[in-house]
Image: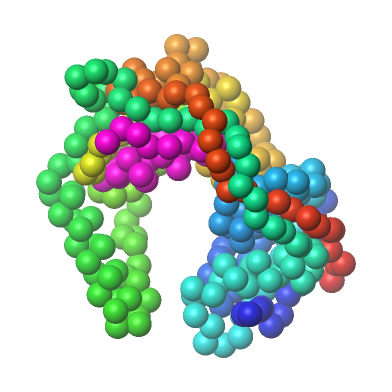
Amino acid sequence: DARYEVVAIKAVEGSGSMMVRMLPGRLEYNGLPLVILLRQALQKPDYQIVGAPGWINTERYTITAKAPEGTAPTAMTVMMLNLLKDRFHLTTHLETREQPIFNLVMARADGRLGPDLKPTPAECQATIEQRLADAKAAAGRGAPPPPPPSSFPDPNDPLACGFVRMGPGLATGSGRTIAQIVPTLSDLLGRPVIDKTGLTGRYDYALKFASTGRGAGPFATLPGPPPPPDDPDAPGLTTAVQEQLGLRLESARGPVEVVVIDTLEKPTLD
Protein backbone atom coordinates (compact mmCIF):
# COMPACT_ATOMS: atom_id res chain seq x y z
CA ASP A 1 0.00 0.00 0.00
CA ALA A 2 1.12 3.57 -0.70
CA ARG A 3 2.53 5.40 2.30
CA TYR A 4 4.01 8.80 3.09
CA GLU A 5 7.79 8.52 3.44
CA VAL A 6 8.05 11.30 6.05
CA VAL A 7 5.41 12.06 8.71
CA ALA A 8 5.57 14.49 11.65
CA ILE A 9 2.76 14.86 14.21
CA LYS A 10 2.55 17.48 16.94
CA ALA A 11 -0.19 18.30 19.45
CA VAL A 12 -1.63 21.82 19.38
CA GLU A 13 -2.83 23.64 22.48
CA GLY A 14 -4.66 26.95 22.74
CA SER A 15 -5.82 29.07 19.85
CA GLY A 16 -4.03 29.28 16.56
CA SER A 17 -4.44 29.12 12.83
CA MET A 18 -6.28 26.15 11.31
CA MET A 19 -5.67 25.01 7.78
CA VAL A 20 -5.62 21.84 5.70
CA ARG A 21 -3.99 21.41 2.31
CA MET A 22 -4.12 18.03 0.61
CA LEU A 23 -1.69 18.49 -2.25
CA PRO A 24 -0.22 15.97 -4.68
CA GLY A 25 2.72 14.53 -2.77
CA ARG A 26 2.13 16.46 0.45
CA LEU A 27 -0.30 16.78 3.36
CA GLU A 28 -0.35 19.95 5.48
CA TYR A 29 -2.78 19.67 8.38
CA ASN A 30 -2.44 22.52 10.85
CA GLY A 31 -4.17 22.92 14.21
CA LEU A 32 -7.19 20.75 13.39
CA PRO A 33 -9.08 18.01 15.22
CA LEU A 34 -8.52 14.53 13.82
CA VAL A 35 -12.16 14.16 12.73
CA ILE A 36 -11.48 16.11 9.52
CA LEU A 37 -8.67 13.76 8.46
CA LEU A 38 -10.71 10.71 9.49
CA ARG A 39 -13.64 11.74 7.28
CA GLN A 40 -11.32 12.34 4.33
CA ALA A 41 -9.42 9.07 4.73
CA LEU A 42 -12.54 6.93 5.20
CA GLN A 43 -14.49 8.85 2.51
CA LYS A 44 -17.55 8.76 4.77
CA PRO A 45 -19.69 11.45 6.45
CA ASP A 46 -20.15 11.48 10.23
CA TYR A 47 -23.38 9.50 10.19
CA GLN A 48 -21.58 6.58 8.54
CA ILE A 49 -18.71 6.52 11.07
CA VAL A 50 -19.54 4.69 14.30
CA GLY A 51 -17.58 4.19 17.50
CA ALA A 52 -14.95 6.93 17.19
CA PRO A 53 -13.65 8.26 20.54
CA GLY A 54 -14.77 11.74 21.56
CA TRP A 55 -11.24 13.18 21.59
CA ILE A 56 -11.14 13.25 17.76
CA ASN A 57 -13.35 16.35 17.98
CA THR A 58 -11.37 18.15 20.70
CA GLU A 59 -7.68 17.23 20.48
CA ARG A 60 -5.95 19.27 17.81
CA TYR A 61 -2.92 18.25 15.77
CA THR A 62 -0.49 19.56 13.23
CA ILE A 63 0.49 16.84 10.77
CA THR A 64 2.91 17.25 7.89
CA ALA A 65 3.56 14.36 5.53
CA LYS A 66 5.55 13.97 2.34
CA ALA A 67 4.90 11.30 -0.28
CA PRO A 68 7.61 9.57 -2.32
CA GLU A 69 8.55 11.32 -5.54
CA GLY A 70 6.20 10.50 -8.40
CA THR A 71 3.30 9.28 -6.24
CA ALA A 72 0.03 9.47 -8.17
CA PRO A 73 -2.54 11.98 -6.87
CA THR A 74 -5.09 9.15 -6.74
CA ALA A 75 -3.01 7.49 -3.98
CA MET A 76 -3.45 10.34 -1.51
CA THR A 77 -6.57 8.93 0.15
CA VAL A 78 -4.89 5.55 0.64
CA MET A 79 -1.83 7.26 2.15
CA MET A 80 -3.99 9.24 4.58
CA LEU A 81 -5.70 6.03 5.66
CA ASN A 82 -2.35 4.28 6.12
CA LEU A 83 -1.09 7.26 8.14
CA LEU A 84 -4.04 6.78 10.53
CA LYS A 85 -3.38 3.04 10.69
CA ASP A 86 0.36 3.43 11.33
CA ARG A 87 0.40 6.38 13.72
CA PHE A 88 -3.08 6.32 15.34
CA HIS A 89 -3.49 2.51 15.25
CA LEU A 90 -6.79 2.79 13.38
CA THR A 91 -8.63 -0.46 12.74
CA THR A 92 -12.15 -0.66 11.29
CA HIS A 93 -14.73 -2.97 9.83
CA LEU A 94 -17.85 -2.45 7.71
CA GLU A 95 -21.38 -3.23 8.84
CA THR A 96 -24.83 -2.60 7.43
CA ARG A 97 -27.20 -1.30 10.10
CA GLU A 98 -30.86 -0.35 10.11
CA GLN A 99 -30.88 3.40 10.75
CA PRO A 100 -33.14 6.44 10.37
CA ILE A 101 -33.09 7.86 6.84
CA PHE A 102 -35.03 10.38 4.80
CA ASN A 103 -36.71 9.69 1.47
CA LEU A 104 -36.72 12.76 -0.78
CA VAL A 105 -39.97 12.95 -2.77
CA MET A 106 -41.93 15.52 -4.73
CA ALA A 107 -43.98 17.76 -2.43
CA ARG A 108 -46.75 18.40 -4.98
CA ALA A 109 -48.87 15.82 -6.75
CA ASP A 110 -48.51 17.76 -10.03
CA GLY A 111 -44.70 17.60 -9.83
CA ARG A 112 -44.25 21.36 -9.82
CA LEU A 113 -40.87 22.55 -8.55
CA GLY A 114 -40.42 25.13 -5.83
CA PRO A 115 -39.40 28.73 -6.61
CA ASP A 116 -35.73 28.09 -5.74
CA LEU A 117 -35.17 24.90 -7.73
CA LYS A 118 -34.88 25.73 -11.43
CA PRO A 119 -33.56 23.88 -14.49
CA THR A 120 -30.00 24.97 -15.23
CA PRO A 121 -29.75 27.25 -18.30
CA ALA A 122 -28.66 25.46 -21.48
CA GLU A 123 -25.39 27.43 -21.75
CA CYS A 124 -24.25 26.35 -18.29
CA GLN A 125 -25.28 22.74 -18.98
CA ALA A 126 -23.13 22.76 -22.13
CA THR A 127 -20.18 24.16 -20.15
CA ILE A 128 -20.46 21.39 -17.55
CA GLU A 129 -20.74 18.68 -20.21
CA GLN A 130 -17.56 20.03 -21.85
CA ARG A 131 -15.72 19.94 -18.52
CA LEU A 132 -16.80 16.32 -18.03
CA ALA A 133 -15.72 15.41 -21.56
CA ASP A 134 -12.31 17.04 -21.02
CA ALA A 135 -11.85 15.13 -17.75
CA LYS A 136 -12.80 11.83 -19.42
CA ALA A 137 -10.40 12.47 -22.28
CA ALA A 138 -7.58 13.25 -19.83
CA ALA A 139 -8.28 10.06 -17.89
CA GLY A 140 -8.15 8.08 -21.16
CA ARG A 141 -4.66 9.46 -21.78
CA GLY A 142 -3.59 8.67 -18.24
CA ALA A 143 -3.22 12.38 -17.56
CA PRO A 144 -4.48 14.20 -14.46
CA PRO A 145 -7.89 15.83 -14.85
CA PRO A 146 -7.97 19.47 -15.94
CA PRO A 147 -7.89 21.86 -12.98
CA PRO A 148 -11.23 23.39 -11.98
CA PRO A 149 -11.91 26.98 -13.03
CA SER A 150 -9.66 29.24 -10.97
CA SER A 151 -11.95 32.27 -10.87
CA PHE A 152 -13.95 32.01 -7.66
CA PRO A 153 -16.67 34.65 -7.38
CA ASP A 154 -17.00 37.04 -4.50
CA PRO A 155 -19.50 35.66 -1.93
CA ASN A 156 -21.89 38.42 -2.90
CA ASP A 157 -21.62 37.74 -6.64
CA PRO A 158 -23.96 35.42 -8.53
CA LEU A 159 -22.86 31.80 -8.31
CA ALA A 160 -20.63 30.71 -11.20
CA CYS A 161 -21.70 27.83 -13.46
CA GLY A 162 -21.11 24.46 -11.80
CA PHE A 163 -20.12 25.82 -8.40
CA VAL A 164 -21.66 25.42 -4.95
CA ARG A 165 -21.66 27.75 -1.97
CA MET A 166 -22.37 26.75 1.62
CA GLY A 167 -22.45 28.47 4.99
CA PRO A 168 -24.53 28.60 8.15
CA GLY A 169 -28.15 28.65 7.04
CA LEU A 170 -27.26 28.70 3.33
CA ALA A 171 -26.75 26.08 0.63
CA THR A 172 -26.74 27.01 -3.05
CA GLY A 173 -25.58 25.29 -6.21
CA SER A 174 -25.45 25.63 -9.98
CA GLY A 175 -25.74 22.86 -12.56
CA ARG A 176 -26.29 20.08 -10.02
CA THR A 177 -28.19 16.85 -10.41
CA ILE A 178 -30.50 15.74 -7.60
CA ALA A 179 -27.95 12.98 -6.92
CA GLN A 180 -25.38 15.75 -6.27
CA ILE A 181 -27.74 17.75 -4.07
CA VAL A 182 -28.70 14.78 -1.88
CA PRO A 183 -25.27 14.47 -0.13
CA THR A 184 -25.50 18.13 0.89
CA LEU A 185 -28.89 17.48 2.48
CA SER A 186 -27.50 14.34 4.13
CA ASP A 187 -24.61 16.31 5.65
CA LEU A 188 -26.92 19.02 6.95
CA LEU A 189 -29.47 16.56 8.36
CA GLY A 190 -26.97 14.07 9.73
CA ARG A 191 -28.62 11.04 8.12
CA PRO A 192 -28.82 9.50 4.64
CA VAL A 193 -31.22 11.04 2.14
CA ILE A 194 -32.49 8.73 -0.62
CA ASP A 195 -33.59 10.34 -3.88
CA LYS A 196 -37.06 9.18 -4.84
CA THR A 197 -38.06 12.30 -6.80
CA GLY A 198 -37.65 10.80 -10.28
CA LEU A 199 -36.13 14.12 -11.38
CA THR A 200 -33.42 14.05 -14.05
CA GLY A 201 -31.25 16.78 -15.52
CA ARG A 202 -29.36 19.60 -13.83
CA TYR A 203 -30.74 22.26 -11.55
CA ASP A 204 -29.81 25.53 -9.87
CA TYR A 205 -30.98 25.72 -6.27
CA ALA A 206 -30.88 28.02 -3.26
CA LEU A 207 -31.78 26.99 0.28
CA LYS A 208 -32.01 29.44 3.16
CA PHE A 209 -32.86 27.96 6.53
CA ALA A 210 -32.38 28.28 10.29
CA SER A 211 -29.07 26.53 10.99
CA THR A 212 -29.74 26.27 14.76
CA GLY A 213 -26.08 27.03 15.34
CA ARG A 214 -24.85 24.16 13.18
CA GLY A 215 -22.31 24.88 10.49
CA ALA A 216 -22.65 23.43 7.02
CA GLY A 217 -20.56 20.67 5.56
CA PRO A 218 -17.54 18.74 6.83
CA PHE A 219 -15.95 21.61 8.75
CA ALA A 220 -18.99 22.11 11.00
CA THR A 221 -17.18 20.87 14.12
CA LEU A 222 -14.14 23.12 13.82
CA PRO A 223 -13.41 25.27 16.86
CA GLY A 224 -13.70 28.99 16.35
CA PRO A 225 -16.07 31.91 16.75
CA PRO A 226 -19.77 31.11 16.70
CA PRO A 227 -21.60 31.64 13.42
CA PRO A 228 -23.69 34.78 12.98
CA PRO A 229 -27.17 34.58 14.48
CA ASP A 230 -29.89 33.02 12.37
CA ASP A 231 -32.42 35.06 10.50
CA PRO A 232 -35.37 34.92 12.93
CA ASP A 233 -37.72 34.46 9.98
CA ALA A 234 -35.77 31.60 8.39
CA PRO A 235 -37.62 28.24 8.34
CA GLY A 236 -36.19 24.94 9.54
CA LEU A 237 -34.35 22.89 6.95
CA THR A 238 -37.15 20.39 6.24
CA THR A 239 -39.64 23.24 5.83
CA ALA A 240 -37.20 25.14 3.59
CA VAL A 241 -36.73 22.09 1.35
CA GLN A 242 -40.49 21.85 0.87
CA GLU A 243 -41.29 25.55 0.48
CA GLN A 244 -38.22 26.59 -1.53
CA LEU A 245 -37.40 23.47 -3.58
CA GLY A 246 -40.83 21.87 -3.85
CA LEU A 247 -39.48 18.62 -2.38
CA ARG A 248 -40.40 16.79 0.82
CA LEU A 249 -38.31 14.82 3.29
CA GLU A 250 -40.12 11.75 4.60
CA SER A 251 -38.76 10.01 7.69
CA ALA A 252 -38.10 6.30 7.23
CA ARG A 253 -35.69 3.55 8.24
CA GLY A 254 -33.40 1.64 5.96
CA PRO A 255 -30.08 -0.21 5.66
CA VAL A 256 -27.03 2.04 5.92
CA GLU A 257 -23.41 0.94 5.45
CA VAL A 258 -21.28 2.21 8.33
CA VAL A 259 -17.59 2.09 9.17
CA VAL A 260 -17.18 0.84 12.74
CA ILE A 261 -14.06 2.12 14.51
CA ASP A 262 -12.55 -0.83 16.39
CA THR A 263 -9.44 1.00 17.63
CA LEU A 264 -8.17 4.56 17.36
CA GLU A 265 -5.48 5.81 19.73
CA LYS A 266 -3.74 9.10 20.37
CA PRO A 267 -0.41 9.08 18.53
CA THR A 268 3.16 9.17 19.70
CA LEU A 269 4.21 12.74 18.99
CA ASP A 270 7.33 13.85 17.12
- Count the marks: 0
Q: Magenta segment: does it hold 192?
A: yes
Image: 5 above or below 171: below
Most extreme residue toward the bottom, as rendered?
69
- Where residue 139 sits, quadrant-wise, is bottom left
Q: Magenta segment: does it hold 241?
A: no
What percent of the width, then of the height, locates residue 42? Answer: 61, 58
Image point 31% across, 20% down: which residue? 107
Image point 49% across, 75% down: which residue? 73
Between 232 and 207, the one nearer to me in the picture? 207
Between 112 and 156, the one nearer to me in the picture? 112
In this rendering, position of residue 64 left or right of residue 160: right
How has the structure been colored for display?
A: rainbow
What percent of the width, then of the height, locates residue 242? Answer: 36, 20
What percent of the width, then of the height, locates residue 143? Answer: 35, 80
What percent of the width, then of the height, locates residue 156? Answer: 35, 36
* Quadrant housing the N terminus: bottom right
Most extreme residue toward the left, as rendered?
122
Image point 26% across, 63% down: which residue? 132
Q: Can residue 147 be seen in this view?
A: yes
Image point 50% across, 12% down: which residue? 232
* Magenta residue span: 170-198
* Quadrant housing the C terminus: bottom right
- Where residue 26 sits, quadrant-wise, is bottom right
Q: Is residue 153 visible?
A: no
Most extreme residue toward the top, as rendered?
233
